[in-house]
């Protein structure tokens, strides 16, 4: 170990550095020959062993009882680093900068409430379609739930228009889960699009996912794809989006904690940290001016 | 071990000055100073020079393969030679190019950046270098010394990750696999020595005021890498020794016919192999972390987040290895675990990409060649990460496993990220290492040719992969739609080769008659620029004292020092 504090005093104008030595190389070469002997002949390994042992002994001699040093003459030169730039400019970022948006956000329960309301609203046009087109209250339920009923392959129209418990349970689970998840998603994303929440959440988003479904449903569930009436489908999706978006937007918003320092967010009492972050995070410096070269 | 309270009882040699730098030294004496040196700068340069030589060797191997694949039904190379070439290309690039490069940079820069006079363990440092170097020569000696089936010289030919059970004695006769396994054990010993040294240096040798959180990020990342090396080289060495037991002592670890399991080898190899990617890429990040702030004229954005992200990458990388093995037939929960853990890697790497962009944002960017390589690295690493996420999805992986899509993906990481960062680092620190600036004009030619060649080769290589072209095939039938892509890939490889030749020429010419660099050519802020170029053997005549992460900024701007803000 040759940390500089432990080095012997060197005369003025000299510095003591670890002396060059070939013993590590001898040890490495010995190990090489040991390995080479594994592939070729034991005699080479033996030679390698001799070299490795003498390398090790030589290495010990370098550091015991005293580490061997060599003296190197040293000139203490003054070095004053200078920048080629003339000025330091600052990038100012005010506290309202977009990095701090959203300032407020709906709570988690607001998203859930929106999902529940939207899910209920969606049932109305879907059921209306079943009643008008097929005089059946269960048509839409069976279409959605039929996907999860294993023994129901290629059902007849009579089967689809009549009540079936397993289809109802499946449909309820799918519908409830999707409604709640999309509601949560609305709660999380609507504050990022603060201008027209109803337009974006109620119209644009449902059109977007209906388009994706329209393009892919023939691959995912061809049977459902055949039976769907896309105009009514879009209407029920928009009903969901409008109601869910409206409910979420109506709920009281809470302030986000992004502007608080990490320590405050996790509840640590560290008074010193709060002022510092504003200097470090918001104030970046850069050099400007002509290059001197 | 030396204790300053004891009297110095052995005379110190008084050579007066540094040998080798005095005029009139014969080349033999100069050689002697290099062979016996324990100086971290000389050893660092030897690592880097060694890596450059093998970069050319492995590059030629790659070009030979690309010539062979340019047209269908080619007979330029025999299948046996082709197998040896891709095995040696991979093994060389990882163990004899990538590792020596990153260890060389760490060796040269870590002591300078923390204001130390040498590594903590200078003799171990020399030993580590010689183990790595001799390991490489040992591997290449197999071309002469390993008697293959044909009785002629031969070389390892079972892919760079030693495809078990192909490596067993029954399938790999002769001694090629023995050379391969023993060479990797040797260079592994060297690598572990280097890692121990970096850790000891960082913890014991920092100058006054250099707290852990004032260290340059390059030092932090090399510390992280060193820790990762200690964890990952061990399973590799263990696996190689198990393989040798199989081959020499009649063991059956990987022999499925006798109750062993090739899958065991896959696990051992990949729990080394995946973190190895990060062992190579973290020091490459480290270079970008120094280059990007200097040429953006801004401090690095989010220093603590960068440190945390590096540690996060190192940690997560230890839990993703089986994403290389989705096709061996793991259980569904096993697949799911490795899909999800691999996805997690995206989080800390994403943090890094955002922080690099934020560092450049609003800065006064200077597009030197070094900076151009660093910026290209950020963009290319992002793309490499995206195909990585695609491949981490088990179903996608089942389709594309062992196709050229995978080859294109990992070359995007290894070349697009790591090699680009190494070039960036060479342009940045060559003036420090030699005292001469590299020519920027030749450098720009090098950059643009290399970018062109890189994208021709590795962008287009994804497509034959998607069309089902398997890796490791030495030739193919026409009519699969692979031909035109392979021609483009091959031409791109030659463009890269020309760029690298240009770079070699630039290095030699600039070394002989380049412009004087002076101590601080880039107007940078870390301690290596506070001493002459090249630095004297003792690095700093007066031991530095630092008060912030950018000590030279503080000196250059005494009216507005960093320590006020940190
Ligand atoms: Cu991996």
Image (tube, coloured by chain):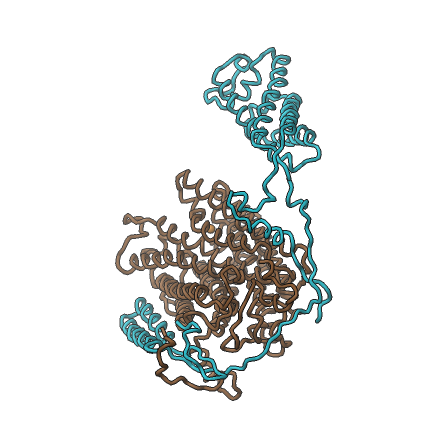
Q: Is residue B426 above or below residue A230?
A: below
The answer to whether residue A204 is above or below residue B170 is: above
Q: Is residue B373 in view from this perspective?
A: no
Q: Quadrant of the N terminus of chain A?
A: bottom left
Question: Which quadrant would the C terminus of chain A be assigned to in this image?
Answer: bottom right
Residue that sits furthest to the right in the current view: A290
Q: Is residue B11 left or right of residue B45?
A: left
Chain letter matching colour brown: B
Give the total of numbered labels.
0
> Residue at horizontal 64%, vertical 52%?
A282
In terms of image quadrants, where is residue A178? top right
Chain A hue?
Answer: cyan
- Placement of B267 over or under B99, stated as above or below: above
Q: Position of residue B559 (x, y in %)?
A: 66, 65
Of residue A284 and residue B235, the one placed in the foreground of this image is: A284
- Residue at the top extreme of this rendering: A135
Give the x, y percent position of residue A82: 65, 71
Of all residues shown, which one is farthest toward the front? Answer: A271
Front one among A72 and B505: A72
Q: Is residue B253 left or right of residue B231?
A: left
| Residue B256 at least partly seen | yes
What percent of the width, then of the height, locates residue B214?
53, 61
The image quadrant of residue A96 is top right
Residue B93 pos. (x, y %): 48, 62
């Amino acid at each position: 170990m040759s940390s500089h504090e432990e080095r012997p005093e060197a005369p003025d104008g000299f510095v003591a550095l670890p002396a060059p030595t070939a013993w590590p190389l001898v040890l490495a070469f010995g190990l090489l020959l040991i390995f080479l002997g594994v592939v070729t002949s034991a005699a080479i390994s033996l030679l390698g062993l001799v070299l490795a042992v003498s390398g090790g002994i030589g290495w010990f001699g370098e550091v015991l009882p005293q580490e061997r040093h060599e003296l190197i003459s040293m000139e203490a030169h003054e070095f004053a680093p200078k920048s080629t730039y003339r000025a330091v400019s600052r990038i100012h970022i005010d506290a309202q900068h977009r990095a701090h948006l959203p300032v407020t956000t709906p709570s988690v329960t607001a998203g859930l409430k929106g999902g529940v309301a939207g899910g209920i609203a969606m049932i109305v046009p879907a059921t209306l379609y079943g009643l008008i087109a097929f005089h059946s209250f269960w048509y839409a339920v069976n279409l959605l739930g039929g996907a999860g009923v294993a023994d129901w392959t290629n059902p007849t129209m009579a089967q689809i228009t009549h009540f079936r418990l397993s289809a109802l349970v499946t449909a309820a689970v799918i519908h409830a889960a999707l409604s709640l998840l999309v509601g949560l998603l609305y709660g999380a994303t609507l504050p990022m699009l603060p201008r027209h929440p109803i337009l974006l959440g109620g119209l644009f988003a449902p059109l977007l996912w209906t388009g994706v479904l329209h393009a892919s449903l023939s691959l995912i569930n061809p049977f459902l794809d055949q039976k769907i009436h896309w105009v009514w489908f879009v209407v029920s999706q928009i009903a969901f989006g409008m109601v869910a978006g409206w409910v979420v937007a109506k709920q009281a918003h809470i302030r986000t904690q992004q502007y608080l320092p990490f320590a405050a967010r996790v509840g640590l009492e560290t008074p010193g940290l709060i002022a510092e972050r504003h200097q470090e995070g918001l104030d970046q410096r850069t050099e400007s001016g002509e290059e001197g070269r | 071990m030396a204790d300053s309270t004891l009297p110095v009882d052995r005379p110190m040699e008084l050579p007066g000055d540094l040998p080798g730098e005095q005029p009139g030294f014969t080349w033999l004496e100069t050689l002697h100073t290099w062979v016996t040196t324990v100086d971290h700068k000389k050893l660092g340069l030897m690592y880097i020079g060694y890596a450059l030589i093998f970069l050319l060797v492995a590059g030629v191997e790659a070009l030979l393969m690309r010539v062979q694949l340019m047209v269908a039904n080619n007979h330029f190379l025999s299948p046996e030679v082709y197998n040896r070439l891709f095995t040696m290309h991979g093994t060389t690039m990882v163990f004899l190019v990538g590792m020596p490069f990153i260890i060389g940079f760490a060796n040269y820069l870590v002591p300078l950046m923390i204001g130390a006079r040498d590594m903590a363990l200078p003799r171990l440092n020399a030993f580590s270098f010689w183990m790595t170097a001799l390991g490489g020569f040992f591997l290449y000696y197999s071309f002469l010394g390993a008697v293959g089936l044909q009785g002629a010289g031969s070389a390892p030919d079972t892919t760079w990750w030693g495809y078990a059970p192909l490596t067993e004695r029954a399938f790999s006769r002769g001694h090629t696999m023995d050379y391969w396994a023993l060479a990797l054990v040797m260079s592994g010993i060297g690598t572990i020595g280097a890692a121990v040294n970096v850790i000891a240096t960082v913890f014991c040798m920092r100058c006054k005021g250099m707290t852990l959180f004032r260290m340059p990020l390059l030092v932090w990342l090399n510390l992280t890498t060193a820790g990762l090396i200690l964890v990952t080289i061990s399973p590799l060495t263990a696996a190689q020794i198990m393989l040798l037991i199989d081959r020499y002592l009649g063991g059956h670890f990987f022999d499925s016919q006798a109750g062993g399991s090739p899958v065991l080898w896959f696990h051992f190899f990949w729990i080394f192999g995946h973190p190895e990617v990060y062992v190579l890429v973290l020091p490459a990040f480290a270079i970008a972390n120094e280059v990007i702030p200097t040429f953006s004229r801004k401090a690095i954005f989010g220093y603590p987040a960068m440190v945390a992200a590096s540690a996060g990458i190192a940690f997560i990388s230890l839990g993703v290895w089986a994403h290389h093995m989705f096709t061996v037939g793991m259980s569904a929960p096993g697949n799911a675990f490795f899909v999800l853990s691999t996805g997690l890697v995206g989080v800390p790497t994403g943090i890094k990409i955002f922080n690099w962009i934020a560092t450049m944002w609003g800065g006064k960017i200077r597009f030197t060649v070094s900076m151009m390589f660093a910026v290209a690295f950020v963009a290319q690493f992002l793309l490499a990460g995206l195909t990585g996420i695609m491949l981490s999805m088990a179903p996608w992986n089942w389709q594309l496993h062992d196709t050229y899509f995978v080859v294109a993906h990992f070359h995007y990481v290894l070349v697009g990220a790591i090699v680009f960062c190494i070039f960036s680092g060479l342009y940045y620190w060559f003036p420090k290492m030699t005292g001469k600036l590299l020519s920027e004009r030749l450098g720009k030619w090098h950059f643009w040719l290399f970018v062109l060649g890189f994208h021709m080769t590795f962008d287009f290589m994804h497509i034959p992969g998607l069309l089902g072209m398997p890796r490791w095939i030495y030739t193919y039938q026409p009519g699969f739609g692979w031909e035109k892509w392979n021609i483009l890939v091959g031409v791109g490889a030659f463009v890269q080769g020309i760029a690298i030749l240009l770079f070699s020429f630039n290095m030699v010419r600039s070394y002989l008659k380049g412009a004087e660099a002076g101590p601080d050519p880039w107007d940078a802020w870390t301690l290596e620029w506070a001493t002459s170029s090249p630095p004297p053997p003792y690095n700093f005549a007066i031991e530095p004292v630092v008060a912030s992460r950018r000590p030279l900024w503080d000196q250059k701007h005494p009216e507005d020092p960093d320590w006020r803000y940190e």
